[in-house]
Amino acid sequence: MDINDLRSLFTVLAFIAFIGIVWWAYSDRRKATYEQAAMLPLDDDSEFVPSEPQVTKNQERKSS
């Protein structure tokens, strides 16, 4: 077994790991969780109150 055989084996193992991660991420058990997470930006549970913009010392120097 030389270095090229080890490289080939590592490539195959990495590909199998990649396929496993993709299968895990797209499994049906996770669908409800992903749909709930996708709706988070659209939830309007609290009233938005804009605040004053924060000005740092670096920004004050640049504007002067």
Image (tube, rainbow, N blue to C red):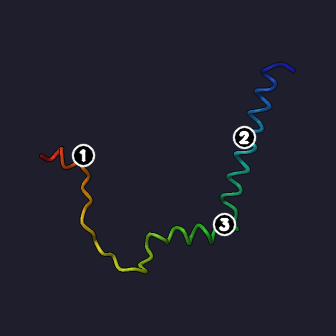
Q: Position of residue 62 (x, y in %)?
A: 18, 44
Q: Position of residue 8 (x, y in %)?
A: 77, 28
Is 6 displayed left or right of 19 in the figure?
right
Disc 1 to disc 2, how far (Cα)? 48 Å
Q: Nearer the viewer, residue 20 or 64?
A: 64
Q: Is residue 1 above or below residue 10?
A: above
Q: Position of residue 31 (x, y in %)?
A: 64, 68
At label 2, which amino acid type do we have? Phe
Q: Is residue 45 above or below residue 12?
A: below
User: Going 19% across and 49% down the picture, which residue do you hit?
Assistant: 60
Q: Residues within 10 Å of mark 1 (few under 14, many from 20)?
A: few
Disc 3 to disc 2, how far (Cα)? 22 Å
Q: Position of residue 41 (x, y in %)?
A: 44, 69
- Numbered label attached to residue 58: 1
Which of disc 1 and disc 3 is earlier in sequence?
3
Element on which disc 1 rests: helix
User: Going 70% across and 68% down the picture, which residue do you hit?
Assistant: 29
Is 62 displayed left or right of 10 in the figure?
left
Residue 15's image quarter?
A: top right
Q: Residues within 10 Å of mark 2 (few under 14, many from 20)?
A: few
Q: Nearer the viewer, residue 45 or 37?
A: 45
- Which is more foreground, mark 1 or mark 2? 1
At label 3, which amino acid type do we have? Arg
- Numbered label attached to residue 15: 2
Q: Residue furthest left?
A: 64
- Quadrant location, the N terminus: top right
User: Going 24% across and 49% down the picture, which residue do you hit?
Assistant: 57
At label 1, which amino acid type do we have? Asn
Element on which disc 2 rests: helix
Residue 3's image quarter?
A: top right
Q: Is residue 45 above or below residue 57?
A: below
